[in-house]
Amino acid sequence: MNSRTTSFSVSRPQLSQRPSLSSRLSFAVSTAERGEGRDAPAVERIEEEIAEIKRYEDFNTIDWVQDAAQERLRRKVRHRKTAGLFKEGQVTWRYKLWESYDAAQGWIVVTLIGAVIGLNAAFLNIITEWLSDIKLGHCTTAFYLNENFCCWGEDNGCDDWVHWSGFEPFNYILYILFATVFALTSATLVKSFAPYAAGSGISEIKCIIAGFVMKGFLGLWTLIIKSIALPLAIASGLSVGKEGPSVHYAVCTGNVISRLFDKYKYNASKTREILSACAAAGVGVAFGSPIGGVLFSLEEMSSYFPLKTMWRSYFCALVATAVLAAMNPFRSGQLVMFQVKYDRSWHFFEVVFYIVLGIFGGLYGAFVMKWNLRVQAFRKKYLTKYAVLEATLLAAGTAIICYPNAFLRIDMTESMEILFLECEGAEDYQGLCDVDKRWTNIMSLVVATVIRVLLVIISYGCKVPAGIFVPSMAIGASFGRTVGIIVQAIHDANPTSVFFSACVPDEPCITPGTYAFLGAAAALSGIMHITISVVVIMFELTGALTYILPTMIVVGVTKAVSELFGKGGIADRMIWFSGFPYLDNKEEHNFGVPVQVVMTNDVVAIPVHGMALQSVEDLLSQPKYQGFPIVEDQHKKVLVGYIGRTELRYAIDRLRRERRITISPEAKCAFSPPVLGAVTPMTPTVTFSNADFGMSSASVDFSRYVDATPVTVHPRLPLETVMELFRKVGPRVILIEQHGRLAGLVTVKDCLKYQFKVEAAENPREDSDIHERHERVWGWILIAAGWVSDKVLSASGGRIRLGSVSEEGPLGRAPGQIMDGDEDVLDDEGGVELENR
Amino acid sequence: MNSRTTSFSVSRPQLSQRPSLSSRLSFAVSTAERGEGRDAPAVERIEEEIAEIKRYEDFNTIDWVQDAAQERLRRKVRHRKTAGLFKEGQVTWRYKLWESYDAAQGWIVVTLIGAVIGLNAAFLNIITEWLSDIKLGHCTTAFYLNENFCCWGEDNGCDDWVHWSGFEPFNYILYILFATVFALTSATLVKSFAPYAAGSGISEIKCIIAGFVMKGFLGLWTLIIKSIALPLAIASGLSVGKEGPSVHYAVCTGNVISRLFDKYKYNASKTREILSACAAAGVGVAFGSPIGGVLFSLEEMSSYFPLKTMWRSYFCALVATAVLAAMNPFRSGQLVMFQVKYDRSWHFFEVVFYIVLGIFGGLYGAFVMKWNLRVQAFRKKYLTKYAVLEATLLAAGTAIICYPNAFLRIDMTESMEILFLECEGAEDYQGLCDVDKRWTNIMSLVVATVIRVLLVIISYGCKVPAGIFVPSMAIGASFGRTVGIIVQAIHDANPTSVFFSACVPDEPCITPGTYAFLGAAAALSGIMHITISVVVIMFELTGALTYILPTMIVVGVTKAVSELFGKGGIADRMIWFSGFPYLDNKEEHNFGVPVQVVMTNDVVAIPVHGMALQSVEDLLSQPKYQGFPIVEDQHKKVLVGYIGRTELRYAIDRLRRERRITISPEAKCAFSPPVLGAVTPMTPTVTFSNADFGMSSASVDFSRYVDATPVTVHPRLPLETVMELFRKVGPRVILIEQHGRLAGLVTVKDCLKYQFKVEAAENPREDSDIHERHERVWGWILIAAGWVSDKVLSASGGRIRLGSVSEEGPLGRAPGQIMDGDEDVLDDEGGVELENR
């Protein structure tokens, strides 16, 4: 029986010291270190199996130290293998081909991913435009053409494109209906097929790139549903943008495609590189801003961004944008829907107004974040079951409110294009450039700003694909334009004032469009707390080279104001809100305590020899342990290694699977890491050497799975340094060792728990108050729902219960509910995550 | 006597266990931990004194872990101090003011530095322009005006600006003379006052930011001399640029100014932040590209670039560029000497030619790096004594060669401006846009390219302030323009070809200027191995928004080609060449060995108790030890801490200084780190507790200076992980500990030595060959020098020996020689650095 499963036998020095184990046969001993390449495939297979298991351990974190070690071993094994297969002088062209393929694989994967992202973006752009236009009218030549294509070559509409009717109220109703149907479809798709496709996804991706495992979040279904539901959500007129989801589908693409290649399948750190690159490409295609995308990935998405990743991101964004440019979805030769050129330069006195814009950006960000988080909390508590209904009602409401306002009715991107205009030449929209309509415009813009802010607060986070970049920019643009028009009015009233002395007489001095542009930058920076990327994105979006200094000033002021209201943009706040174990690298802590304050003292350690298999399995059955330190004996606790829960579980399962004789629960387990000569190279986590037994009295050897060199620190090391280690080197657990003895164990969650405790002590919150308010709001909603339901019931003479959207009524439907249950699990698990270690 | 120096006494738990030390009195016990803030100033003072000493330990590396720990302690002490001084409810306005000043200090410093950098840049620009113009002619209205200011408002020269004479050969000679005198002055200034002002400084600053101490490199003298010598060097016409030096003077400014503030004086990590920010500002003002500067700092300069540093860099670059813009040195309202706008877009078929440009960039970089390093080696070996003569002769030679060629004669920046032109409208230079002169132009450009490449190879590294950005860009531009003209010619010859089908008939299709632009980007990327920063810099330089994809493609190809010829740009190569202990973060190693292969085994450790003072001093007298692990006893070697050489030295000196009675050399030294309660917060490196003695038989307690928590790792940890620790966490030394026992010690240099050994084994070099060739070249130079000297001697009838430049002749002069001696020390030390630990 043994002969079937073992490939060869190696006597291992320290094992032979134990006389009781005479009939031992150890299979697949850490061969890579011993120079025998023969059972390298076995090592690789076990590696891959464990990697596979780990991938499916949801809500877990990746140990980057182990991952790097495994990758190094894999490379070495491959090197040996190929060296063995192709001896010196016998290098065939096939080997050469294989080698170059292997080296080029990374680039091939990135190119492929970039191309798919670019294609997908082009497709999304075309669909979104068509859906947005169909709300207002249709093309008589061919219904599948949007207004631009229908009226090809003409600037301001044409006869082929007709509104649905000449009767305005009917158009209004049709507009609302379309919006509602789009939102309903989008939300239903998300709820039924891929709950993870809801929202922007940026917070989650940040955590995933940092090493948190979320099964399915980057899966094929999420990709497909996000790609279909996104155009619907945007076309529904909800105050949501496409860039967050754009990052999400780009990262999904990267994950799905890279999984097809061996190089990425089992290597988390290489995958992380790809995911960072995809995030860059996602922003790159959303804004037509490849460099901005790379910087966004660097500034916002990636906790670890070495130059190599930057280079991959650069390449991925380049390919994606080039493909998008080649597809030319807007038929304008441009990457973005709008591109503005400012001919006039700015004056130094305008800096005063730029500072106003910057302050607005900061306040906007702080205000929206505060209230949006409250809405999110409310949503999580009361609306989880009514996700589809909520999105649908929101879309209907948004359509009803927005249609009357000229700047809210049209697409947000379009409205930005209009607001950015320089007012040179003929282009004008609704008399925006008209000096006589100045006060009407200001009123209209202020209304648009206020309504949009409220809509963003309640819409962002609802269960359709939804970003917050473009809505924020649109708000900033309408506010900025307001300021610009006011400044222009002041200048027109006092053209000879000393303040305006820099203006050239009889020439337009103030360009309100540039204020809109700067306002957009401020709002974007305020909500996301990013700086460089905003400047570059705005720059790539418009090519306003002369406005680089004003943009920098505005963003700088915004950043300074934002910091007064606490750290972290909306993505970071969402991470805390969801309770993901993410160590922020933006914050600088000064706890002034050693790690021993935070560590778990009563660590369950496994002795090197003598623990019964039954006891080991008992330990494993307790889900709260993610791994066990190995000590020389339970009293002295001299640390010799560490074994992960996954590895141990796998080893035991494998044992059961491969040996059909029953192993006695009394069998003793051995965990001694292999002793090697001083100079022999070795890699720690993979010093595998497995199982030998035969009778019930035999012992089981788990040495193979023991990590001989876990990361250890002294108990007095400052907590800040330990957190830095977690952040920069990335182990899953750090053991605390004093004079060679195990003193404790610390995880990221222990650190985060302490951090939250300290922060909570510093800023106590009044949760009960919020709770009460939530209850009251929910009460009103129920009353309103009841009233509407009654009205509909009576109006339809009892035939319709709860109106046209009632099929998703307050009682909810089964299929979606299960998915939402999943979602709940995520949230709960996220919370629980912080509890166990 | 004791009462004078001690402030209070604390009985310390573990000390009282030793009965022999009854009359102990420990002063300045780690008070911060104990909550008594009374002698906090003493702690701070000692800290500062040690920091002061460390600053002056030349060619040393900074321990970032210790630095962070010290900063945390300092903050806590300050916090306690202020909390003690101002009790709750008694917060005065003065305290508030002081607190806000303290918080704002960072921003005040950065603003100040940015403003000074901007002013300096404006001043430099004006001087450089004037000096460059004076070579060709002068202003008749006022000699101190350059051509632009002299002919204010006119485009192509005016009558007020006249050439030196109407006789062309005389102008030629005057041109050469001016160039020679400028170079002579520049080189003499550098040699006499600040040898560190030579070269670009980028390599050294990289090392300094990474933690290497180079005394005086960022000093006031270097700043002054670099600021004066730089315009002279550029005006001399040498093939050198201003951006490298621009980074250097910016960083000097930052260092000099931040030294004036307490917050930065003693904190290396905060200073590092400022230096990174200054590097960004330096590139920002050199190119008028603030964002490009930040990215350059991120991509090239800084080994550690957290978001906080990015934000500081952003702000610093913003202030510097805004000041420069307000100064408006070019009177064009622009930040840079040139700004191009391309009206025409590109076609997809042009990608073929873009790839050619990209390949050129890669080859150019590899070629120049290889040969420039050989020239540098030659210079180091033979020309160190003749630095001034070399620079002068180079300038004269450059002037003689360059004057006849239309593209080499003018300033490099000016020539780039011309080459970038779109050839729309009237602007033309030397018939560059003229279709008839096409082949003349191609010839002229090819000659310019080749000569410039050769000049760059021999000029970069000569002992004047000299950068390589602009020369590289100029070379790329002339090559690119050549390609552009050729492509245009092909198109003109086959306008109907399928290949050119994307061209609109009867409209100009190919814009050679854009090829020049892309060529410049390629060459810059090729020589520096940077990507994103090049794209953004080119972008900010010209505002060519539509060309962002082509730029990215070209730079991408260049990067790919460059990597075939080895890693690292010229700055990295210079670091290896100079032997600085710099761990590159661009490379990924795969040694496959544990750290025990690299570590020093026979570490000299100090026992906790019992070593005689004399023995300790003997150890200190050996310069090869930078610190000593503390072990429980010499046999078992249980590790308890680490003490740095500087701290130990300081402690002994302080002992001697403060106690006037002689301490017996037999006095026993105690090094036990203080034991604290498990929960008491503490910071490791500053667990001070000093000296108690009185009679010759007493013991001296150095516990105060012992670092209780040095960074330790297991001997089997892979070397790659250890290098990662050095890079990311930044300790100066890592101790190797197995089961609580000291097994060895490893430093960055140990890792680098191993790395070089492995690399040398992989790519053996034939040094003897190079050596021989060097000898031969030197022989020729001596022959030529002899011949020239003879000629001059005979021509002058024996009155002049060695011609007009002979005052700096082969025998050299004393003042410079001493300085060069210093320089030699640097190089030697750099080499030696790697030998000891």
Image: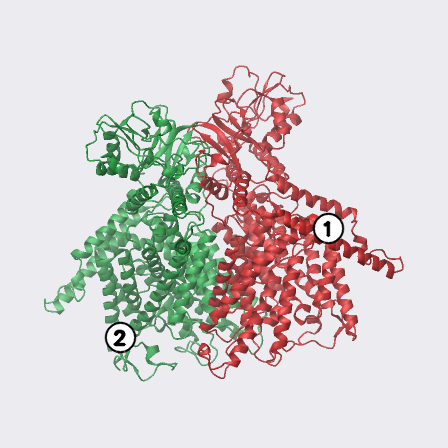
Chain colours: A red, B green
Quadrant the N terminus of chain B occupies: top left
| Quadrant in the picture for residue A802 | bottom right
Question: In this rendering, is residue B522 above or below A725?
Answer: below
Label 2 secondary element: helix
Q: Residue A542: horizontal and vertical position, in percent?
A: 55, 68
Amino acid carrying mark 2 in the image: Tyr
Q: Nearer the viewer, residue B584 or A619?
A: A619
The answer to whether A162 is drawn above or below residue B616 in the figure is below
Q: Residue A476 carries which label?
A: none
Q: In the drawing, what numbered circle is on residue B172?
A: 2
Looking at the image, which residue is at 68% across and 23% down? A660
Residue A490 in percent (x, y) is at 52, 77
Residue B115 falls in image quadrant:
bottom left
Give the residue at x 37% y 65%.
Answer: B118
Nearest to viewer (mark 1 / mark 2): 1
Image quarter (top left, top right, bottom left or bottom right) of the C terminus of chain B:
top left
Q: Mark 1 lies on which chain?
A: A
Q: In this view, does A583 lie to the left or right of B826?
A: right
Q: Which of B790 and A304 is in front in this view?
A: A304
- Residue that label 1 marks: A191
Query: Is residue B362 visible to us here?
Result: no
Q: Do labels 1 and 2 share a chain?
A: no
Q: Which amino acid does label 1 sit on?
A: Lys
- How far across and down, in percent of the image, does residue B684 sit? 39, 37
- Residue A602 vs residue B266: left or right? right
What crowding class fits label 1: few (fewer than 14 Cα within 10 Å), some (14-19), or many (20 or more)?
A: many
Disc 2 packing (10 Å; few <14; some 14–19; many ≥20): some
Q: Residue furthest top?
A: A20
